[in-house]
Amino acid sequence: TYAELDRAADRIARRLTGAGAGPGTLVAVSAERSLDLVAGLLGVLRSGAGYTPLDPEYPAERLAFMLADSGAGILLTQRGLPVPEGCAARVLLLDDEDGQEGSYEGELTAPGADDIAYMIYTSGSTGRPKGVPNTHRSIVNRLRWMARTYGVGPDDRVLHKTPTGFDVSVWELFLPLITGARLVVTAPGGHKDAAHLRDTIAGHGVTLAHFVPAMLDVFLAEDDVERCASLRRVVCSGEELAPHTARAFTTRLPGCALANLYGPTEAAVDVTSWECEGELDTVPIGAPVDNTRLYVLDAELRPLPPGTPGELHIGGVQVSVGYHRRPGLTAARYVPDPYGPPGSRLYRTGDLARWRADGQLEHLGRIDQQVKIRGQRIEPGEIEAALRAEPGITAAAVIVREDNPGDKRLVAYLVAADGPAPAGEPAPEGSAAPAPREPDPAELRTALRRTLPDYMVPAAFV
């Protein structure tokens, strides 16, 4: 119940405050998807601190980097989950029933609108993930827009299935809590299982859910999806929503509305929306959400007319404060807004877009190398850097291939270093130098999984 959640979050907030959490600090949270996690994140926010999620499924080296880079002074975790190597933070257990010693007894300090609510790490082109802090002002604007636009209230049941390392999880968790709706939490790993999602939605009467378009295709391929008649609203984001997917959805679940949303982590989850209605020959990303300004600009930051492609820039309250401890990158991507109030900034998305004559935006791809697969934001440069760090590889290039429609895969192209032939194999006859040794794909996958999450490990090596 809400009363039980209130008490659990209060206990956690007082433990955190007693350990030094408060406005201006970050608490790292590593936990499986569970009711404990919900209480933990709410407790962090009540202490005035912001949270930075550490997905337990990530490789140990990546978690250790994120924890150290964040500067979080406290790690809130669960029994049975490993603590990242070199952890300098104080460790508190979410599921510690006897952990009230040192709890703060006074009045908790509420965060301000411009304090950090959360910081999520995204893939980095230089080989290391980068933290993106977002303020309460930013995410509250996004939540209030969604609550008003979709009429979310106490009669709704909202599905939470997205891992906390991805920003969709923020609205899945907190939209129901600010509207009095019921929160339905899927089992750990359940977000990958379409049959489990179908049964959860049907069994718990879920009314609002999110799908990455690739997962929506998988969901629609399941039998008996029509059992999910309680759904009144599905939102898609994370990658391009293909017209055939939108049409298939409206055919299978004609009583459920479908919206296509777009936005980067750097602007509090989503900044546009479009209702999937009518013939659905195309699926634009739509128009801006509340208190958000969108511009399609040329290289000189001059507005382009409808129909002309340019880089999409975001202004308004949802623009994040920049990249954590990355002033150079922040200066390059967050630029002064020549069209907004004094002191305001634009975020350069790196996305190519154009305005339609009807005032809706079309997304046309990227102007850089960033890609998205099944909603996961990937910088090929980070994978390439990890490959070049492996012995025997002098150069690497990673691309996305889509040999079958809808089946996007990462493929790595490698240049092997000259080296001795494996033991027991003679050198090529007449060769003056050792021939390059062919890298072993299985060894490369094992090596990459020490630093990269599974979704960033290439499916093939050439």
Image: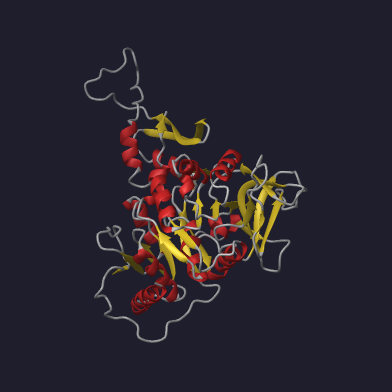
Q: For residue 420, what is the image quadrant?
A: top left
Q: Can residue 246 be seen in this view?
A: yes
Quarter the N terminus occupies: bottom left
Q: Where is residue 207 in the image (x, y as percent from the top left)?
A: 50, 58
Q: For residue 11, what is the image quadrant?
A: bottom left
Q: Position of residue 60 (x, y in %)?
A: 32, 52
- State the count of labels: 0
Q: Nearer the viewer, residue 85 or 78?
A: 78
Q: Is residue 72 visible?
A: no
Query: Horizontally, is 156 left or right of 261 in the view?
Result: left
- Rendered view: 156 above or below 441: below
Query: Horizontally, is 52 left or right of 81 in the view?
Result: right
Q: Which residue is drawn at 69% across and 61% down?
A: 337
Query: Horizontally, is 75 left or right of 122 in the view?
Result: left
Q: Position of residue 403 (x, y in %)?
A: 50, 29
Q: Which of 220 and 366 is in front in this view?
A: 220
- Rendered view: 273 above or below 214: below
Residue, far top:
430
Q: Which of 77 and 4 is in front in this view?
A: 4
- Rendered view: 119 above or below 303: below
Quarter the C terminus occupies: top left
